[in-house]
Amino acid sequence: MPISNSLSRRVFFATAATAVAGYVLLERHAVLAAPSAPKNPEGPVTVVQFGDDGKAVGKVTVPRVIKTDAEWRSQLSPLSYDVTRREGTERPYTHNMLDVHDAGLFRCICCLNALFSSTTKFDSGTGWPSFWEPIAKENMVEITDRSFGMARTAVSCRECDAHLGHVFDDGPAPTGLRYCMNAAAMKFVKTA
């Protein structure tokens, strides 16, 4: 094989690999570069409230929780801020919430909106807390996420627009769904 052909292939593959790596880094940077804008910045929202006993109190209309970036940073840990306000993702198997098996509620770390009941939690083997159903669909917003060159369904808190994770259609019965959530986006409260 002539040297020029061998060199041309190396240059081509090196350039292609560099371009792909650059695209991935830019895509990740674009996702993390700006805090999440509220999906519906005006007006109140309607959610289903739950007491710490795990029972539904009922549908209520509440003001949307809106804070400045500085307020969110002072309230949240750096990881929770990155996940909820900048749509980041925690590393799998790095949070003790995988080992939570008590009866209780998983609430939004930002506003304490009820998200999941422990009765719908299951071990998905993915390294993130997974649920087959939210405690109330009204408490969440699902939108198409086209980051990283793929289409997924992102899940956020209706009350404060915190990014929570994604939902996939490879979960167990009865819904067939897997709500793959970031533990850093939630707070577990044992039922009273």
Image (tube, grey):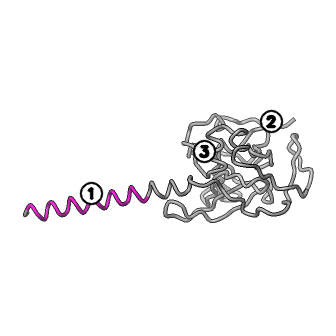
- Residue located beneath label 2 in the image: 190
Q: Main secondary structure of the magenta part?
A: helix
Q: Nearer the viewer, residue 190 or 109?
A: 109
For marks 3 and 2 on the same chain, the one whose residue lies earlier in the sequence:
3
In this image, 10 relative to 37: left or right? Answer: left
| Residue 61 % position (x, y) | 90, 58
Q: Is residue 18 left or right of residue 69?
A: left
Q: Please report whichever mark, 3 or 1, sits nearer to the chain's N-terminal start.
A: 1
Helix, strand, or loop for circle 3?
loop
Residue on which disc 3 sits? 128
Q: Which residue is mark 1?
A: 14
Mark 3 closeness class: few <14, some 14–19, many ≥20 residues within 10 Å: many
Give the alpha-carbon distance from disc 3 to disc 1, as whole Å. Answer: 35 Å
Q: Residue at x 82, y 56 (%)?
A: 64
Q: Secondary structure at mark 2?
A: strand
Is the residue marked by circle 1 packed among few (<14), some (14-19), or many (20+) residues within 10 Å? few
- Segment colored magenta: 3-23
